Structure formats: structure tokens, C-alpha cells
Amino acid sequence: MCAQPDKSSDLLYRRGFYVLLAAATLFRLFYIQWVELAPDEAYYWTWSRHLQWGYYDHPPMVAFLILVFTTLFGQGEFGVRVGWVLLTALLSCVLYFTGRVMFRSERTGFYAALLLNFSLLASAGAIIVTPDGPQGLFWALSILCIYLAVSGNGNAWWYGTGIALGLGLLSKYTMILLAPCVFFFLLSYPEGRNWLRRKEPYLAFVLGLAIFSPVILWNAQHDWLSFRFQLFHGLGVKKEVGLRYFGDYWAGQAGLVSPLMFMGILWAMGKSAWLGFRLKKDIFLLLFWTSAPILLFFAYTSLRSKVEANWPALAYFSALAAMAGLALEEWGRWGRGKRIFAWAAVLIGLLFTVLAHVQPIQAVIPIQAHRDPTSQLHGWRALGDRLKETAGSLDPARGIFLLTPRHQLVGEGMFYTRGKIPAYQWDAPNRINHLSPLNSPPAGSQGIFFTEGGNELPRGLEPLFESCEKLEPFVVRRNSSVVRTHPLWKCIGFKGLDSKTY
């Protein structure tokens, strides 16, 4: 383990962590209100207006949190996102404590938190609402609880692990990967195998499932809708299999934490495996089993289907703690080249993070606007103004609603009309806003249909209205370049729906 630093050094790194945490959190609290909601963020916001124990895509934690924080801070970008800033602050604290207690070093805790905050992983997770935010916190918390349990700090920490597992499962289904990771960790060293003969790890798993059980019940009542979607979406074999997505997967991981930091993470995973299996050090076995298998599991999945860059994010929390601890242990034995590489990894991670915050505000990276992912954070407020303007030309006494074929557009349309105009999704029976006989506006209402791309109304929509008039499309531009086009129609005299006609 690391040599014990003196108390003045401990105090310096502890204060350094507090400064880092405060600076990052205050900046993010300021930043989140200036960037428009991404399409998926707006979609998750609609969930908070229809609270239930499950949704087509994910469990309900993201909806619960948005509801809590929009109730406290209002229905704006700040209210939607502030919870994720706080989740990232808590995640930084957990990673700091993990590094500190595992390596008995304030310095390791500080650098583990610094590496987290200097990566796109945390920066994007703090300002963009996804289920990964709460899941990441509970995953990291579970690892800390497991370490405290197996290192003689009391069996009660196993129940903390169970609570973290359950809350993580309420956030995102891939939290279940914790169970095999912990099982193989315990199986891989003698003291761990003793734990497999005791009740606490199994009770922790049962506790986690008990917390998650309302989602299981909801799925059972809805023909296992969400479970089936995730199994096909994440693990189903697509037509284009082989190496097509394999390279994209590794490139995406390098981009998520920056290329040099990713190389450092792979080194830390390999070094943890060597120290753990060769020298039977339980700390490194835990850090290995809760990181590398996740990365490899999704690498295998990428041979079968496309894997989004954020899916293996769980792998990096243990890996960053290992990277910080191992680098500091070996720092005195490293030559100049390795030290330069280490600092370059940190500084390039910071550069990536800075650019990721600047690009949505001012495009400094020369990417075509329609190919720039940050362009998805532009144009929605103006589109909402156009929808409100169109609604103003209709008769309010007859009722007005929005209609669109994409669930993300339902969210953007509702959010940027401030929820004053109800919105429905066309031809999407598994989504909560699906237009159906049980969920439709009154007959005689007036609809505004809008989409992204295309020039024709969907088949079967026009007969539901007395008339539909195509309007001038709304074009989103950035730096004089077209990002996307939204065709619009004004549809008068909704005829209503019944089970025979729809």
C-alpha cells in the first residue's frame, strides 16, 4: 500500500478535494441553465408527468428524480438537470472515499475524484439527464460498501450493498451486472470464498431484488415490455454483425474518457489483475472484477449489435480509483517518460472536458453542424416558440394538441411550450404518450403535426381530421448551416378515435 503521508499533506489533499468539488459543482449549477434540453432529456421529463413503476425504455428512477427537483426548482432546464449535478457531486465524494480508504491515502482519494471530473464521463453525466447518473452513483457506492464489508468493518455493509443494488436497478437494468462481478470477486481468493458460505452476500442480493420488485411486478403486468425491449435493444443480434461495431465501440470508449486516460485505465485494469491474481490482494481483485469484465462484456456485445458509448460507463469508477492508487504507488519508480504520459493523460482529459462544455455554446471544433452531436442541444426553444405561434392562430375554444411520430419530439414540444399544449405520439403503442382510443384529445380539437425530415403526413393520419394544411417548415440553423428541418401541418377538426377506426 501507499506510504503514509504526513498530516499536513493529508490536510492539503483533503482541502484540495473540497475545492475541486465546490468549483466543479458551482460551475455546473451555473452552466446547466444555459443549454437547451437534449431530445432524450425532454423525453425523460415527460415521464415525470406520468409517474409509474416502469417505462418502455428504463426503470423509473430518472422520472422520480426529475419530479422531485422540478417540484423544488421549477419546470426549466435548471430544475430538470440540477439533480444530476448533485448526483455527480455525490459520486465524486464516493470515489474520493473509495480511494482514501482502499489505499489509506488522502492523495489517492483526491486524484481519483480529479480523474473523474476531468473526464467526459462525469462532465456529460452531470449536465445531461440520463439513467446512467443515478446508476453510476449506486454502483460506486456498492463497491465501497463491499470493500468495507470484506475488510472487517462490519457485516452491515453488505446490507448497504443490497440497498445500493436495489436503487441502482431502479435506475437502469444493467446494474444487475454487479451480481456476477461480486460473485467472481469472492470466488477468486480464499477469504472471499468464506463469504460465499455465509448468508450476508445472499441477503444483500435478496434485499436489492426486494427494492426492485415493484419494477418486476410492473413488467409482469405489461407483458414484460421493458425487459423484452432492453434484451433485444442491448443484446439482440442485428443483421450487421461482426467487426462493424467493434471498432466503433473501442473508439467510443476512448472518446468517453479521452484517449490517453483510456490507455491509463486499461493499464490499471491489467495491473489490478496481476496484483490481484498473482499476489491475492483483495483490493485489486475487487477493482478488477468491477471494471474489466464490464468493458469486455460490452465489447463482446458490440460483435452482435451496436453499443452506445455510455453503456459500459460502470467499468470506469473502479478503474479510476485503481489508476489513481497504482500511479501514485509507482510514481517514485517511474522515469520521466511515464510521468509526462501520466500528466498528459490528465491534461488532455481536462482539455476534452473544457471543449465539451464550450462546443454547445460556441462551436470551436470545426465539425459540420448536422454531424456535431452538440447541435442536438440547439433549436428546441425556437421550435417551441413556432409551435406556440401556430397554436395562437387556432381557436382556443376548440382545444389544441401537438402530434409527432417521435417520442423525443413529444418531449421537446411539450417542454418548450411549457406543458401548456398536450402532446401525443403517432403510431407508438408502447410509449406513454401514444395516441390511442384511451389517450386522445376530444373530437373537434385542432392538431399541430410536426416531425423531423420528410415532406408527407404519415399514412392514416390525414383521415382523422377534417382538413390538414401544410405550413412553412421550421429550419434549425447553426453558424448559417442547416442542422435539421421540422415540417409542420395544421390539422383542423379531429374526428376522434375508437377501437374500430384505429
Image: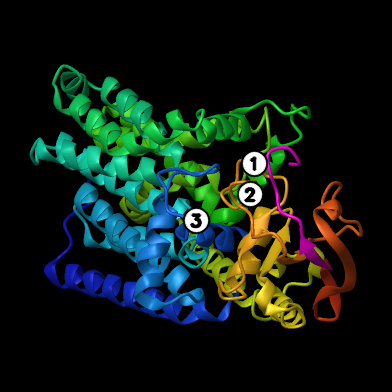
Q: Is residue 264 above or below residue 282?
A: below
Relative image position of residue 282 (x, y in whole percent): 25, 33
- Dot 2 amino acid type: His
Residue 99: image location, x then y, percent = 27, 53
Residue at position x 85%, y 81% in the image = 480
In the picture, the disc for residue 429 is 1
10 Å crowding of disc 1: few (<14), some (14-19), many (20+): few
- The residues bearing labels 1 and 3 have C-alpha atoms spaced at a distance of 15 Å
Secondary structure beneath disc 1? loop
- Which mark is first along the chain, 3 or 1? 3
Q: Quadrant of the C terminus?
A: top right
Q: Residue furthest top?
A: 197
From the image, tell me which residue sits under label 3. Answer: 47
* Camera sees residue 336: yes
From which residue to which does the magenta span run? 489-502
Residue 428 in the figure: left or right of residue 222: right
Q: Position of residue 36 (x, y in %)?
A: 60, 74
Given residues 13 and 64, the one toward you in this image is 64
- Note whether residue 333 is visible: no
Crowding at dot 3, Cα within 10 Å, few <14 / some 14-19 / many 20+, comes out as many
Q: CA distance from mark 2 to mark 3?
A: 13 Å
Q: Are marks 1 and 2 in contact (CB under 8 Å)?
A: yes
Q: Which is in the foreground here, disc 1 or disc 3?
A: 1
- Lateral position of residue 463 relative to residue 421, left or right: right
- Secondary structure state at the residue bearing disc 2: loop
Label 2 sits on residue: 434
Q: What residue do we see at 40% from left, 63% from top?
A: 67
Q: Is residue 43 above or below residue 355?
A: above
Is residue 46 in the magenta section? no
Q: Position of residue 126 (x, y in %)?
A: 46, 65
